[in-house]
């Protein structure tokens, strides 16, 4: 894809010299990042130019999760193909207004045999956190820039099948969790129905996600007993999840380096809930800022909008005063329903957004309602560090629920799939030895709160 430099509205809210300088450096970094991506990655048609993504007519005639179309695809990290067969399935789901909508899920099957009796299916929810189609897993997995692919490859190397769904819907409503839950569950239904994959109703299913992916994972686990009770979900692992945005309204006024992420989140929630009137309370500059962010990925949001405070662009005092916004954010709060499967929840103690106090309360609520929850509070590292240090225990938990505990050999090399295999089997041993020497101990440090 040919690179085109993005033009952004002039920022008048950057009052200090330090902020203006840092914002300028971040924009230059974004420009360099986009140029490198355009040269390093495989060119594939974006979803807007790909007929496979077109919404078919008479969608109401299909059941939620029913397969509308399917195709084989190649999944890669940068330009190197992973050692798995992959398909994309288009399926019927339901959007935020209750109308029929189509979604896309990517299904990956390891080429090697599975050691156990029944191959399990892991539904991995990526932290999409973006407002455009080019951040959806169905595109990034083919394009070569899906940052969470190494975690999915870890599951594939254990013989598990993996499905990952574009769960923000046709409007890319980042943060609209009721919609995300339906798309995740319907994506699993479509994966099971895909004849090429060879699943059946008894296939054990696990869910896993971190940060924005954990929110979709937990909301899907809560909605599954009512929405998709036929799914044989045996375990859920989720880390770094935000529980209740109303409890942390200061994130919208933080004005820090990463303020572009909550900026995009508010836009995404407004798309997912028709009663939210964000456009009606934007200043003229706010309208220009929101329009410029319309198709951005999370990286683009963060590098384009540092030091941003939402109140500078609103005609009301803050985000929660936007008409319909408080009710919409309340609808995304976790804990509104009770999961019926075993769960592993983990979080960084020092994570500010999302705050661990909310996670503590959610776990306590689940346990009061009879949910089997293993809870781990990591005292070392923040949000990004725990994304990595929580991997071994998540794989261990899911492996036990699948009836395929991880062997000592696999446990000692949980990171090895980060060096991806080519289709013809290059193993990258030197790279793995170098990685091992840098990583040191494999054990993840934290505080356990048992089930």
Image (cartoon, rainbow, N blue to C red):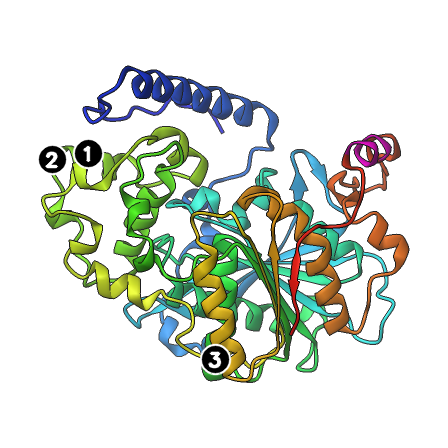
Residue 17, how many percent across, how many down? 28, 15
107 is higher (above) or lower (below) than 379? below
Based on the picture, tell me whether residue 248 belongs to the magenta stretch.
no
Give 347 or 263, whichever is nearer the viewer: 347
Crowding at dot 3, Cα within 10 Å, few <14 / some 14-19 / many 20+, comes out as: many
Crowd rating for badge 2 (residues with CA inside 10 Å; few <14, some 14–19, many 20+): few
Image x and y of residue 34, in percent: 48, 25
| Circle 2 residue | 284
From the image, tell me which residue sits under label 1.
288
* Magenta stretch bounds: 433-438
Placement of 243 over or under 74, stated as above or below: below
Per the image, label 2 sits on a secondary structure element best described as helix
Residue identifier under label 3: 338
Q: Residue at x 11, y 38 (%)?
A: 283
Q: Secondary structure at mark 1?
A: helix
The mark lying in front, picked from 3 and 2, is 3
| Distance from Cα at disc 1 to Cα at disc 3 | 41 Å
Are the residues at dot 1 and dot 2 in contact (C-beta closer than 8 Å)? Answer: yes
């Amino acid at each position: 894809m040919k690179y085109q430099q993005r033009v952004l509205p002039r920022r008048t809210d950057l009052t200090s010299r330090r902020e203006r300088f840092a914002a300028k450096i971040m924009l230059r970094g974004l420009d360099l990042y986009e140029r490198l991506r355009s040269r390093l990655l495989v060119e594939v048609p974006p979803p807007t130019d790909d007929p496979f993504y077109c919404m078919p007519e008479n969608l109401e005639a299909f059941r939620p999760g029913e397969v509308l179309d399917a195709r084989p695809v190649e999944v890669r990290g940068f330009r190197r193909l992973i050692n798995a067969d992959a398909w994309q399935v288009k399926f019927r789901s339901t959007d935020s207004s209750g109308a029929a909508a189509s979604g896309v899920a990517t299904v990956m099957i390891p080429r090697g045999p599975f050691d156990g009796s029944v191959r399990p299916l892991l539904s991995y929810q990526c932290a999409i956190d973006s407002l455009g189609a080019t951040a959806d897993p169905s595109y990034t997995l083919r394009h070569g820039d899906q940052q969470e692919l190494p975690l999915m490859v870890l599951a594939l190397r254990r013989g598990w099948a993996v499905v990952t769904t574009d769960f923000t819907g046709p409007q890319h409503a980042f943060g609209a969790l009721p919609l995300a839950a339906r798309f995740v569950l319907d994506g699993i239904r479509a994966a099971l129905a895909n004849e090429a994959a060879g699943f059946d109703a008894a296939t054990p299913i696990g869910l896993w996600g971190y940060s924005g992916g954990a929110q979709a994972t937990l909301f899907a686990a809560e909605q599954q007993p009512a929405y998709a009770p036929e799914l044989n979900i045996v375990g859920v692992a989720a880390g770094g999840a935000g529980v209740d945005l109303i409890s942390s309204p200061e994130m919208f006024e933080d004005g820090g380096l990463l303020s572009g992420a909550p900026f995009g989140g508010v836009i995404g929630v407004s798309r997912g809930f028709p009663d939210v009137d964000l456009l009606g309370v934007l200043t003229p500059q706010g309208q220009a800022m929101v329009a410029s962010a319309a198709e951005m990925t999370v990286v683009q949001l963060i590098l384009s909008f540092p030091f941003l405070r939402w109140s500078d662009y609103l005609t009301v005092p803050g985000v929660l005063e936007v008409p319909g916004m408080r009710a919409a954010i309340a609808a995304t709060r976790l804990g509104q329903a009770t999961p019926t499967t075993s769960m592993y929840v983990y979080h960084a103690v020092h994570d500010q957004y999302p705050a661990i106090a909310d996670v503590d309360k959610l776990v306590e609520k689940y346990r009061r309602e009879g949910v089997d929850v293993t809870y781990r509070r990591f005292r070392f590292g923040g949000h990004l560090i725990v994304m990595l240090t929580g991997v071994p225990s998540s794989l261990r938990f899911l492996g036990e629920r699948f009836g395929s505990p991880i062997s000592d050999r696999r446990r000692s090399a949980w990171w090895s799939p980060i060096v991806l295999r080519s289709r013809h089997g290059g193993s990258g041993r030197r790279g793995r030895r170098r990685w091992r020497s840098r990583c040191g101990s494999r054990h993840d440090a934290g505080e356990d709160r048992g089930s």
